[in-house]
Image: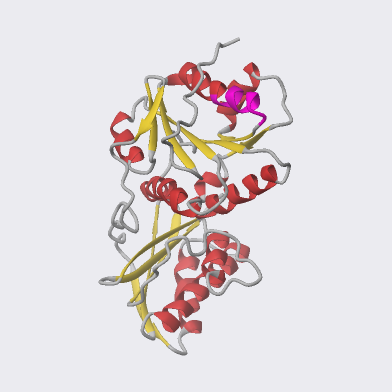
């Protein structure tokens, strides 16, 4: 059995509430050593742990850790391809564990080494930064984010921008690269793939928006349930453009990387980057349309500033 190293426990200088820590490691042995120590430290303190990692990483921990009621494993491989759904998922996992009356820790690792597209990678990285905002005023808990540096050491600096704390050489300290004022999203959107279709829509044009999307979908073999879901998501985004974006917007459609992409541009501004990333409650005003869009689409990219307006891209896989 691997002998785990214990992570540094929270010091008196650590910020109260949510604690978000990056753990760069190299290879499976370091992954097990660091995460197993984190889990054991939690169990010794009568805390529960949500281990949200790819299944192949979970199997490494299960081989070293006796089955524990206080440790819940979640496979992140499916959900991590939908970054807009992850904050809602974490809120559900944490709520479930805190209802048992124990303090909670989490281990969260997305499948960074999978064949992810550039938009998927950027949205996952942006999600890591948004976690700080999502849980800033919530219950106190500690999230450790393992990140394998093998073959991607240059990306560690970008990941450190998203995490207030970082573990290096077995010690935890402030991340010097952490950016508490990160922009609305880290990377600009890529240029639409040529050829793309463009359509300016305004009040009364929602049916025309759906017709334009259906024509593009037909050319690329998208039909049946997936097309109906795309139509519903597109209607929500276009209606928001008309309602909040100055009465009109611009639709562009194209295909890339086995996906159909619909882009909506308008003059509006989304001030809250968390809008739509958690299931709305019964009294919430606004955000229901964007939450639905995140559930219906395979990827959602949002860029919004007061100066440039809002661009929303929704991706639908053409196969699989």
Outermost residue toward the front in this view: 12
Which of 143/203 is in front? 143
Which of 194/192 is in front? 192
User: Does 1 appear in magenta?
Assistant: no
User: Where is residue 153 drawn, in percent x and y?
Assistant: 31, 29
Q: Is residue 60 above or below residue 190?
A: above
- The reply, left or right, for residue 193 in relation to residue 84 is left
User: Where is residue 30 drawn, in percent x and y?
Assistant: 46, 18
- The reply, left or right, for residue 202 in relation to residue 284 is left
Q: What residue is drawn where x is 74% and y is 30%? A: 69
Colour scheme in use:
secondary structure
Q: What residue is drawn where x is 65% and y is 19%? A: 65
- The reply, left or right, for residue 222 in relation to residue 63 is left
- The reply, left or right, for residue 293 in relation to residue 25 is right
Outermost residue toward the left in this view: 307
Most common SS among magenta residues: helix
User: Where is residue 120 drawn, in percent x and y?
Assistant: 42, 48
Query: Which portion, as a residue range, is magenta?
Result: 38-46
User: Where is residue 263 drawn, in percent x and y?
Assistant: 39, 67
């Amino acid at each position: 059995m691997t002998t785990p190293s214990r992570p540094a426990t929270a010091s008196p200088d650590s910020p109260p509430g949510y604690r978000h820590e990056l753990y760069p490691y190299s290879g499976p042995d370091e992954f097990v050593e660091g995460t197993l120590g984190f889990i054991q430290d939690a169990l010794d303190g009568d805390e529960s742990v949500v281990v949200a990692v790819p299944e192949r990483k979970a199997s490494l921990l299960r081989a070293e850790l006796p089955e524990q009621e206080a440790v819940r494993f979640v496979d992140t491989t499916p959900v991590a391809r939908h970054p807009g759904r992850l904050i809602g998922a974490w809120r559900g996992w944490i709520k479930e564990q805190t209802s048992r009356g124990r303090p909670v820790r989490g281990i969260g690792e997305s499948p960074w080494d999978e064949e992810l597209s550039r938009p998927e990678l950027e949205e996952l990285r942006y999600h890591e930064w948004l976690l700080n905002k999502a849980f800033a005023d919530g219950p106190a808990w500690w999230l450790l984010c393992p990140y394998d540096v093998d073959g991607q050491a240059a990306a560690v600096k970008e990941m450190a921008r998203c995490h207030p704390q970082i573990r290096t050489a077995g010690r935890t300290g402030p991340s010097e690269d952490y950016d508490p004022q990160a922009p609305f999203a880290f990377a600009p959107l890529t240029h639409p793939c040529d050829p793309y279709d463009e359509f300016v829509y305004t009040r009364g044009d929602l049916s025309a928006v759906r017709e334009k999307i259906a024509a593009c979908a037909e050319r690329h073999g998208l039909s049946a349930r997936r097309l109906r879901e795309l139509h519903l998501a597109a209607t929500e985004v276009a209606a928001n453009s008309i309602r909040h974006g100055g009465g009109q917007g611009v639709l562009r459609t194209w295909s890339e990387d086995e996906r159909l992409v619909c882009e909506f541009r308008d003059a509006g501004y989304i001030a809250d980057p968390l809008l739509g990333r958690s299931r709305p409650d019964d009294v919430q005003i606004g955000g229901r349309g964007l939450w639905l869009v995140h559930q219906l689409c395979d990827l959602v990219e949002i860029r919004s500033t007061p100066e440039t307006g809002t661009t929303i891209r929704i991706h639908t896989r053409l196969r699989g």
